[in-house]
Amino acid sequence: MEIGAKSSKGDEEPLSNPLALARYYEMEFWQDLDALNVLRPDVVCRVSEHVEQTIVPYIEMILEGGMAYVIPEENEDVDGDSERLRGSVYFDVRAFEDVTKGRTKYGKLAPDSASSDFFSWEETKS
């Protein structure tokens, strides 16, 4: 569904930014649970409320620990600004397994893929 498109109920969706988009679909989710008579949880933890204080420091930590790498955006110099993540960050499964000395194994997301690495983060442009 496109941002600003009409929903199945015919009303305009308030999807002007990522948080509004997340809240819209969260509301739809809660309505579906209510319709199914599913009890709501006592605590709701939204990742969008923890990006700056938890997610970004964690991504920086796994980068510093050599367990992730950055694929820079086109025409971006990753080394030019070490204070901010630029481009897409991928979790390096082999490096993680080396650090944990094989105590933890990650399965491949796709059986035919050569790499088990997976996308972790992409900084959005303001």
Image: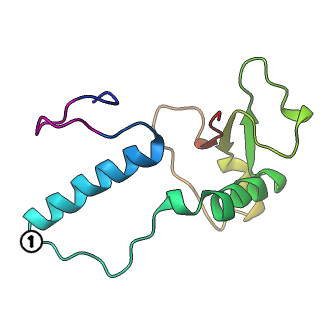
The answer to which of 56 and 20 lies nearer the viewer is: 20
Q: Is residue 62 above or below residue 81?
A: below
Q: Quadrant of the N terminus?
A: top left
- Crowd tier of the residue under label 1, counting other residues whose Cα lies within 10 Å: few below 14, some 14–19, many 20 or above: few
Amino acid under label 1? Asn
Residue 38 in which image quadrant = bottom left
Q: Main SS of the magenta segment?
A: loop
Colour setup of the view: rainbow
> Residue 95, image x and y in percent?
74, 51
The answer to which of 28 and 97 lies nearer the viewer is: 28
Residue 79 is left or right of residue 97, and the answer is right
> Residue 9, image x and y in percent?
10, 39
Residue 62 is left or right of residue 42, and the answer is right
Question: Regarding mark 1 in the picture, which secondary structure is present there?
Answer: loop
Residue 36 in which image quadrant = bottom left
Range shown magenta: 6-13
Residue 8 in which image quadrant = top left
Q: Residue lying furthest top in this view?
A: 75
Please name the residue shown 40% across and 46% down the image: 20
| Numbered disc total | 1
Please name the residue shown 65% across and 68% down the image: 103
Q: Residue lying furthest bottom in this view?
A: 42
Q: Is residue 8 magenta?
A: yes
> Residue 81, image x and y in percent?
88, 37
> Residue 17, image x and y in percent?
46, 39
Residue 18 is left or right of residue 88, and the answer is left
Residue 34 is left or right of residue 122, and the answer is left
Please name the residue shown 53% across and 62% down the image: 49
Please name the residue shown 68% across and 41% down the image: 89
Q: Is residue 125 magenta?
A: no
* Residue identified by numbered label 1: 37
